[in-house]
Image: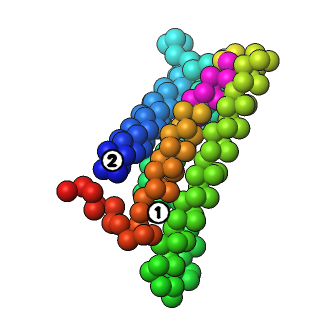
């Protein structure tokens, strides 16, 4: 069972990171096109900046950040203070890893919950972006997908740390 969960968590985190990367590449291309359009605007060639590029960038960057969180959690890439780690015994370090993963799961869950409530609020009041008039609730939904994936991966990380704490290596069931 654990190997299947491990594989699922890795696929989810990797897939979300790839989606986040694709979003960023798309934003870079759109920004370059918009800048080129702005530079060529006065030449009368029909080029112009992309209308609403600021709205697109704002929403895209937020969605990309949330898409990267699951991979960061799975790889233990979040900021950590390891000042005392070398002097603590291994059992204490494993306990600290578990406690940190529990805290990250709690934070990810609260983040997803609050994004969900915010999305409902934005949908109810039909709020839109200033330039494109894009429904803001859809931007919240894009971020919510990443936040839910983050919470799911964080839950797996709690399981992984708990297994390590009791002496089971993450690869123990893989054979």
For the point 63% across and 33% down, which residue is it? 58
Disc 1 versus disc 2: distance between alpha carbons? 15 Å
Helix, strand or loop at label 1? It is helix
Helix, strand or loop at label 2? It is loop
Which is more toward the observer, 62 or 140? 140
Asked if 50 appears above or below 94 in the picture, the reply is above
Q: Are marks 1 and 2 in contact (CB under 8 Å)?
A: no
Asked if 129 appears above or below 70 in the picture, the reply is above
Which is more toward the observer, 81 or 7? 7
Determine which quarter of the picture holds residue 60: top right
Asked if the stretch drawn in magenta spans residue 105, the answer is: no
Say which label, 1 or 2, has the lower sequence index.
2
Res 101 seen here: yes
| Residue at far bottom of view | 87
Residue 3 located left or right of residue 99: left
Asked if 114 appears above or below 132 in the picture, the reply is below
Which quadrant: the C terminus?
bottom left
For the point 57% across and 40% down, which residue is it? 147
Determine which quarter of the picture holds residue 56: top right
Residue 10 located left or right of residue 79: left
Determine which quarter of the picture holds residue 102: bottom right
Which mark, residue 1?
2
Within 10 angstroms of label 2, few (less than 14), some, or many (20 or more) residues? few
Which mark, residue 147?
none
Residue 107 located left or right of residue 25: right
Which mark, residue 162?
1
| Residue at far right of view | 125
User: Magenta stretch?
Assistant: 135-143
């Amino acid at each position: 069972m654990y190997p299947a969960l491990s594989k699922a968590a890795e696929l989810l985190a990797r897939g979300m990171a790839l989606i986040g990367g694709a979003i960023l590449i798309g934003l870079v291309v759109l920004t370059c096109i918009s800048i080129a359009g702005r530079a060529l605007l006065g030449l009368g060639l029909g080029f112009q900046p992309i209308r609403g590029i600021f709205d697109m960038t704002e929403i895209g960057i937020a969605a990309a950040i949330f898409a990267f969180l699951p991979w960061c959690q799975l790889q233990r890439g979040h900021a950590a203070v390891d000042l005392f780690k070398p002097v603590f015994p291994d059992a204490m370090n494993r306990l600290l890893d578990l406690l940190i993963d529990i805290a990250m799961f709690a934070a990810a869950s609260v983040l997803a919950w609050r994004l969900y409530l915010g999305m409902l609020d934005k949908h109810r009041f039909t709020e839109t972006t200033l330039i494109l008039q894009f429904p803001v609730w859809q931007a919240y939904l894009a971020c919510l997908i990443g936040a839910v994936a983050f919470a799911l991966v964080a839950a797996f990380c709690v399981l992984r740390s708990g297994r390590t704490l009791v002496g089971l290596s993450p690869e123990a069931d893989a054979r």
